[in-house]
Amino acid sequence: MTARATTRRLAAVAVLLATGLTLTPTGRAATPALWDDAPTARPTPTQLRAKAAAAERAGDWDTALAAYLDLPATDRAAPATRERLLNAARRAAQGRRHRDPAHQQFVAALPARDAAQLFGEAVGKLAGSFADPARAAPQKLWAAGVEELDRALGSPSFVALYLTGTPAEKIDAFRRTLRTDWATRRVTDHYNARAALKGLLGAAQDALAPRVPAALAAEVLCGACAGLDEYTAFLTPELVADQPADLAGHGLFFGFDSDGLFVDGVTPGSWAAFHTPLRRGDRIARVNNRSMLFGTPDLADALRNPEGGFHSFEFVTPAPGLMSEVRVPLAAPTVYGGRMIPGRDGVGYLRVAEFQATTPRELTDALACLKEQGLRALVLDVRGNPGGSFLAGVEAARKFLPAGAIITTHGQLPQVAGQTFSSASGMAAFDLPLVLLIDSDTASAAEVLAAALRDNHRAVLVGEATFGKGTLQFLLRLNGSGSVRVTIARLVAPSGPLSAGVTPHVLESDPLRQFDLAADRAAELLMPMPMPRPMLVP
């Protein structure tokens, strides 16, 4: 799997992004409307399992997790594989947490008493909102949290941060009490959970004398969340409010060297790849009229001063001494790349990179523009689309479906308890022939759209089977501090659970061939059906 594919795959897992995982794309230049990766042989499930097992033995949990995530959805759904994937996700997130300065600052400023209160609140909200109430029983949340603390106390980095000078034999003895005593303490509700954690922190203070008791409480809290699934996680206030200093949403990544700022990557298929000439290695001279040459310029500060709703980037062109300017919108459009495909009369192309509240309106506007250019059939590209807004995905499906079921949600909360989302757009729906491009990184809300169009026989799907996320998350604010991103529903398409992924009508792994096949199928849909020969009655 390429670095770009790994990035897109992990982007589909919201909890990994939320807990600080950052993988920089390779930044190879993209041909507009096409992926630029040369076709490579995809590892087999057997090879991926072997890679994951080797990484587990080496303690490289990020690599193990990436290997499990690259398995086809049907393989990932096997109970034994699910268990190993969840274990890898928990261990990888824990390792990143121990390396994260923001997390260290959060626990350092959190009184132990407040930490116990925060844990009790989280247990109550998880028990009442997680999609599977049996898995979120307070007793199970407590056991998962104690297990996470046990693992943390076995981590040299955690011990070095918070237990300086504590003898190893005392740590080992306390870990034994965690397994034999604390993990089995009776916890029936959030009040019990809060009291149990207070008692545990008191025992830890006596046995270990930790420098930051709240760090131990945070392990219990994070473990309770992470034990549910790979998408549920506790987020510190910094993670909830964090905004990237670069323009990752536009597909632009930056780096610094002694000469100043340069483009470190342009994500294939991104807005920047379609609509700017910027490519990896380009030297940026100025951002919003602020010099970026030499030293370590403050890009974040420069991005706080846009002009007229745009960021201005002046970059050095290949011609010596010449400069060129690129204007980048503040908010990355989610629908872009609209054009008519040469050689296929009447066939147009659009890309949807993710789903946000603006996406349905962007779709309408982009299609209106293409219709002015003669659009009669559409290739809609959601390859690499990690999802985003569930409701925006539903609304996008309604744009193309005159009628029919779109998706059903199953969860505890009334808003998602057996709720079926359908379309009744009727004559307002776009009725042009439609081909949808999907791949193994198409996930979440993008899978909702893909399944709805496939199951209602509204589009021809071309590419690879989708990721198979099949769940819906919601951000629960905690009064104490921070939030919990929790899985509140399982998603079931008309033909079955989305966790199995969406299989295309036309299977093709080569990105270039995917586009050509989609364009060909769209052109075929425009061909008139042959008239049946009249029967001659003697």
Image: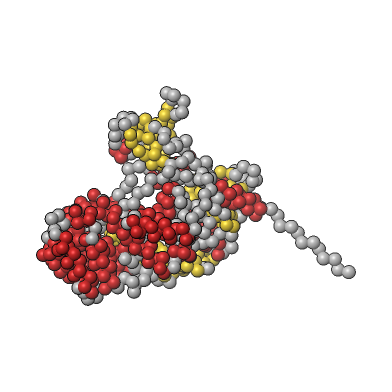
| Residue 343 visible to an observer of this rendering | yes
Residue at image location 30% in from the left, 64% down from the top: 225
* Quadrant assignment for the C terminus: bottom right
The residue shown at (31%, 59%) is: 91
Would residue 83 be found to the left or right of residue 99 on screen?
right
Most extreme residue toward the left is 206
Q: How many marks?
A: 0
Q: 61 and 394: which one is in front?
A: 61
In this orientation, which residue lies closer to the viewer: 483 or 156?
156
**Which residue is located at x 28 percent, y 66 percent?**
224
Is residue 357 among the parts visible in the rendering? Answer: no
- Determine whether 44 is above or below 297 in the image: below
Q: Position of residue 458 (x, y in %)?
A: 58, 60
Between 442 and 36, which is closer to the camera in this rendering? 36
Q: Position of residue 435 (x, y in %)?
A: 58, 54
Residue 162, by quadrant, is bottom left
Q: Residue furthest right?
A: 538
Could you tell me residue 238's position as x and y percent?
26, 51
Residue 482 locus on image (x, y percent):
25, 57
Q: Quadrant of residue 475?
A: bottom left
